[in-house]
Amino acid sequence: MELSSDVVPAPVKLRFYADFEVSVNLKVTASFSFEQSTLLAAILASPETLREVARMAVEIDLASISGSRLTGKYTGPTNEELYDCVLPCLPDSERPYWVELRSGSDDVYPAELLPVFFAFEASLKGTAIETGARVKLYGNEDKGA
């Protein structure tokens, strides 16, 4: 039997949602320099910067999923995007250190900045698929969602 275009329905559109929790690994922060600790504290004190860094952490987590439809969709932030995100939240007294570091060696700057960023860890808490009429939850049942 040959299928005709009259029989084949239009594609079904669904929405996929994921709930992530982003936290700071305090074990990692124990080895931070004064400047790194100050940067972390500034990020945590700025809700807007914290949300943006958390989004970047989720993107890094999604970028690590290989062999799936997400491969190549997420790359995570560049060093410059991360720097541009966090610089405004720093106290004026701490900005010169990071500005000087940024304009210096290409090796030193990421070595100072990236450990602060990688202290943020994303974990998947649940997912949902919306079909239009209802939402099917996965992994949320025991989390109170």
Image: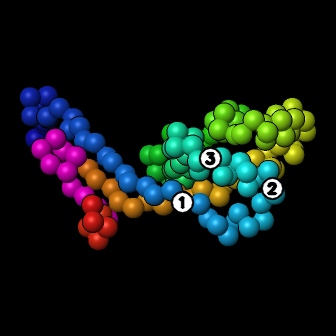
Estimate how packed mark 3 is, as few (under 14), some (14 to 19) or many (20 or more) residues with alpha carbons within 10 Å.
Answer: many
- The alpha-carbon separation of the residues under discs 2 and 1 comes to 20 Å
The residue to which callout 3 is attached is: 43
- The three-letter code of the residue at mark 1 reads Ser
Distance of label 3 from label 2 (alpha carbons): 14 Å
The label shown at residue 91 is none
Residue 22 position, x and y percent, is 51, 56
Check whether the beta carbons of the residues at disc 3 and disc 2 lie within 8 A of each other: no
In-front residue for pair 64/41: 41
Q: For mark 2, does the 10 Å Cα neighbourhood hold few (<14), some (14 to 19), or many (20 or more) residues?
A: few
Q: Residue at x 14, y 28 (%)?
A: 5
**Mark 3 / mark 2, whichever is N-terminal:** 2
Labels 1 and 3: the sequence-earlier one:
1
| Earlier residue among tags 2 and 1 | 1
Residue at the image position 22 percent from the left and 46 percent from the top: 130
Tell me if 41 is positioned left or right of 140 in this view.
right
Q: Nearer the viewer, mark 1 or mark 3?
A: 3
Q: Which type of secondary structure does the marked residue at label 2 adopt?
A: helix
Note whether residue 98 is visible: no
Is 112 contained in the magenta span?
Answer: no
Side of 90 relative to 112 (left or right): left
Start and end of the magenta stretch? Answer: 130-139
Helix, strand or loop under label 3 = helix
Classify residue 106 by image quadrant.
top right
Residue 131 is drawn in which quadrant?
top left
Q: Which amino acid is tagged 3?
A: Ile
Name the spot of residue 97 as percent of width and height, x first: 84, 40
Instruction: Measure how far apart labels 1 and 3 are at the Cα level.
Output: 12 Å
- Report the amino acid beneath label 2: Phe
Label of residue 23 in the image: 1
**Residue matched to label 2:** 34
